Amino acid sequence: MAIRRVMPIVHSEDEDMDQNRDFYGRLGFEEVMNHGWIMTLASPTTPAAQVSFMTSDKTAPVSPDISVEVDDVDAAYAAIREAGAEIVHPLQDEEWGVRRFFVRDPNGRVVNVLSHR
């Protein structure tokens, strides 16, 4: 299993999304995804350098703190379950083209582990 990218998720209010885009745009980030409840900004020269802003997760009971994209989310899910870690949101396919699950890390942070389909 290979890691493709790691991305922090900043919890934000609806009314702050445009301000976040403008602020980080001054640092060179560009909007690459916006579903209304989550917006991702990326470096145009290093596309894996990203940050997301989320109001609340659309399909999960909690909002994650970080996303880790892997090349095989099923293998990651099996490894995490075998280790006995707390699965916060089960493995599932999402309508926006990812397969993902959430796990709680030893610090209590919620990690969104995903692969694009």
Image (cartoon, helix red, strand yellow):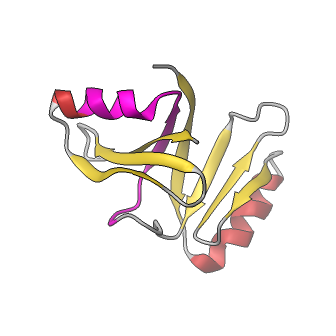
Residue 68 sits inside the magenta stretch: yes
Residue at position x 64%, y 73% from top? 16
Quadrant of res 21:
bottom right
The image position of residue 25, as x and y in percent, is 81, 54
Q: In which quarter of the image is the C terminus?
A: top right
Q: Residue furthest top?
A: 1
Does residue 80 sit above or below 87 in this rendering?
above
Does residue 94 sit above or below 117 in this rendering?
below
**Left or right side of 2 for 76:** left
**Left or right side of 21 for 57:** left
Residue 67 visible: yes
Q: How many marks?
A: 0
The image position of residue 83, as x and y in percent, is 18, 27
Magenta span of residues: 61-80
Q: Which of 24 and 54 is in front in this view?
A: 54
The image position of residue 1, as x and y in percent, is 45, 19
Residue at position x 55%, y 75% from top? 13
**Left or right side of 58 for 110:** left
The image position of residue 95, as x and y in percent, is 55, 61
Residue at position x 38%, y 64% from top? 60
Q: Which of 116 and 65 is in front in this view?
A: 116
Residue 110 visible: no
Residue 78 sits inside the magenta stretch: yes
Q: Which residue lies furthest to the bottom in this view?
A: 15
Does residue 108 sit above or below 46 in this rendering?
below
**Left or right side of 30 for 113:** left
